[in-house]
Image: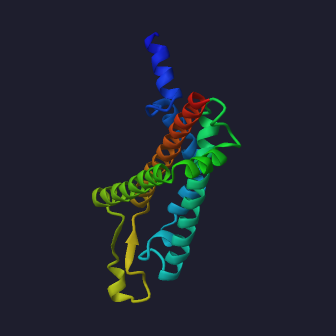
Amino acid sequence: MTATSATHTSHSDGSFMDSGALARTSAACLVVNLPLLALMLVPQLMRSRAGSEALLMVGMVLLLALVVVAVVFAPEVSAKAAPAGTHWRPGGARARVRALIRESRRTYLWRLGEFVALYIAAQGVGGLVAWLLPYVADNPAHAADPTASAWIIDYPNYAVQAVAMYGCICFALAWYATRLRADSARSTARAQNDD
């Protein structure tokens, strides 16, 4: 067996993370989740100091909804960007994930946990960017005019933070989907060996 065929086998049976599939799925996630980026680029919906508590609540509900939808459809995005065999094809990846949940709920919860950990890391990246490029400052005009906003938002810095977090979130979604793709390959290989 050549080195090339050994590598192909390791990916087809799901033994290792397929870095090519991860890259293609990451790129696809960056495109299909643009509504999430659009929301994140509106400081009034994402930061109470830029808007109000009511707007922040609306923004948080929208953010949660978009992230949940992204997680649900990430396997289909992966199947479109990086199909594999007969087990990971567009239109069938979500059904395959449901089958994986039935086969091994623990493995699925581990993959979901990996996504959550990477999502939390994305928030950390956002905090680091905000520390390096502060996007909010006291508004000196507020002292003389209480009707003026108490804060000044540096939108370019805010946008850099949002884009950095968005990139990390899309990577987390791609990681989750690509790991499920590998689990699907392993499950299919086991079923074929049992036959």
When asked about the image quadrant of residue 27, the answer is: top right
Q: Residue furthest right?
A: 91
Give the x, y percent position of residue 40: 50, 61
Instruction: Classify residue 189 as left or right of residue 110.
Output: right
User: 34 or 116, which is in the foreground?
Assistant: 116
Residue at image x 44%, y 34%? 17
- In this rendering, position of residue 4 left or right of residue 100: left
| Up/down of 190 relative to 99, above or below | above
| Rendering coords of residue 117 (x, y %) | 38, 55
Along the line of sight, the residue nearer the viewer: 63 or 153: 63
Horizontal and vertical percent position of residue 156: 42, 57
Callout count: 0
- Residue ranking furthest to the left: 132
Q: Residue at x 45, y 74 (%)?
A: 50
Q: Which residue corresponds to the image point at 47% horizontal and 44% vertical from the top-left? A: 175
Residue 144 sits in which quadrant? bottom left
Q: Position of residue 68 (x, y in %)?
A: 56, 60
Nearest the viewer among 18 and 144 is 18
Residue 103, above or below 49: above
Q: For residue 41, say whether it is visible.
A: no
Q: Determine if residue 11 is in view.
A: yes
The residue nearer to you, when weighing 88 against 79, is: 88
The residue sitting at 49% across, 15% down in the picture is 5
The outermost residue toward the top is 2
Task: Name the quadrant containing residue 154.
Answer: bottom left
The C terminus is located in which quarter?
Answer: top right
